[in-house]
Image: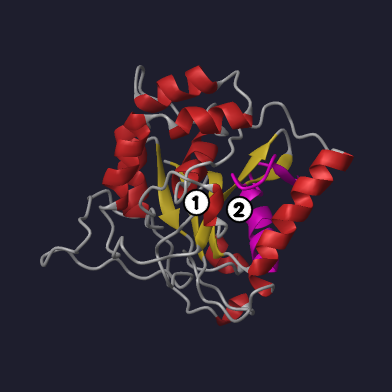
């Protein structure tokens, strides 16, 4: 997760933004492996599904917000190594965003859930059922989340699913089969498919235990994905009933547009440091 302060400029500054090395790591860093530099946006690296735990019967191990872990995860499931990779974002100021490897295909944001999020979720569900709201582009790939602690994997699925035209998947790989099998499903059907998919559950478990953080720690953070589809910036959150549009965007301005939304989200919880931002960049 990434931590930022109320004033983003106050975040400790890194001299550069780099993509994480490809080497996998175990839950406990090996003696000879150098520790991963903490992102200035990083406080607690685990994520969970949303706080209303009773709604989700099945639960996975929380996934660490760590580019090393994410990269091994996606490469093992069918993204060609050297095609795309996750990278840390070290700050939300323009000069730091300019250091992020381009082109950016998706932005992953991890943030602490609060009681306000629960109230907003209930309001959104009510508003959706009564008012409908603006329809999202039919090109947006979106799935609900019905498995506890699966929000990291759901974020990855959203990131890759909405960058399909820019990412070459290995023929016959898990991701190749998953997106083809779920292409014509609605968000709820995709969630059920994912919940019953033993292959993804196993891959998630391997990735979740490959990080540096104690997987037994109780966490209450949540991953969401920002993608640009058909000239719109969408926030893709498996807790919600549909994608949330944040207005016009473009592949070139995706990172900056998402950063504005993220800054506003951080400003609503100024006393927390538990935030993290990563990008999926094409290599």
- Residue appearing at x 42%, y 66% in the figure: 16
* x, y percent for residue 110: 52, 59
**The quarter of the displayed image where residue 169 is located:** top left
Q: Is residue 246 visible?
A: no
Give the number of the disc on residue 279. 1
- Mark 1 surroundings: few (<14), some (14-19) or many (≥20) residues within 10 A: many
In the image, taking residue 15 as reference, residue 9 lies left or right, namely right
- What numbered label is drawn on residue 255? 2
Question: Does residue 67 appear to the left or right of 154 in the view shown?
Answer: left
Residues drawn in magenta: 237-265
**Helix, strand or loop at mark 2:** helix
Does residue 9 appear to the left or right of 102 in the view shown? right
Asked if marks 1 and 2 touch (Cβ < 8 Å), the reply is yes
Whether 154 is drawn above or below 173: the answer is below
The x and y percentages for residue 197 are: 39, 29
**Viewer-closest of 252 and 31:** 31
Identify the secondary structure beneath mark 1.
strand
Instruction: Judge whether 200 appears above or below 256 on screen.
Output: above
Across and down, in percent, residue 157 comes to 49, 37
């Amino acid at each position: 997760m990434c931590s930022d302060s109320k004033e983003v400029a106050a975040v400790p500054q890194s001299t550069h933004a780099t993509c994480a090395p490809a080497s996998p790591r175990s839950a406990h860093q090996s003696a000879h492996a150098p520790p991963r530099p903490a992102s200035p946006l990083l406080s607690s690296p685990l994520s969970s599904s949303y706080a209303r735990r009773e709604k989700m019967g099945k639960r996975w191990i929380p996934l660490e917000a760590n580019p090393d872990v994410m990269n091994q995860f996606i490469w093992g499931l069918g993204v060609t190594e050297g095609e795309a990779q996750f990278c840390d974002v070290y700050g939300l100021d323009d000069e730091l965003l300019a250091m992020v490897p381009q082109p950016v295909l998706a932005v992953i944001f991890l943030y602490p859930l609060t009681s306000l999020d629960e109230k907003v979720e209930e309001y959104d569900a009510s508003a959706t059922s009564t008012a409908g709201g603006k329809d999202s582009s039919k090109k947006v790939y979106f799935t609900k989340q019905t498995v506890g602690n699966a929000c990291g994997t759901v974020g990855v699925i959203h990131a890759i699913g909405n960058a399909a035209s820019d990412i070459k998947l290995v023929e016959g790989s898990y991701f190749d089969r998953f997106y083809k099998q779920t292409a014509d499903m609605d968000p709820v059907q995709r969630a059920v498919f994912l919940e019953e998919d033993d292959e993804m559950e196993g891959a998630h478990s391997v990735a979740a235990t490959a990080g540096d953080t104690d997987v037994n720690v109780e966490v209450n953070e949540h991953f969401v994905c920002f993608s640009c589809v058909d000239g719109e910036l969408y926030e893709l959150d498996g807790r919600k009933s549909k994608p949330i549009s944040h207005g016009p965007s473009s592949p070139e301005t995706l990172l900056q547009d998402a950063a504005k939304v993220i800054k506003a989200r951080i400003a609503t919880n100024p006393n927390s440091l538990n935030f993290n931002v990563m990008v999926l960049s094409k290599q």
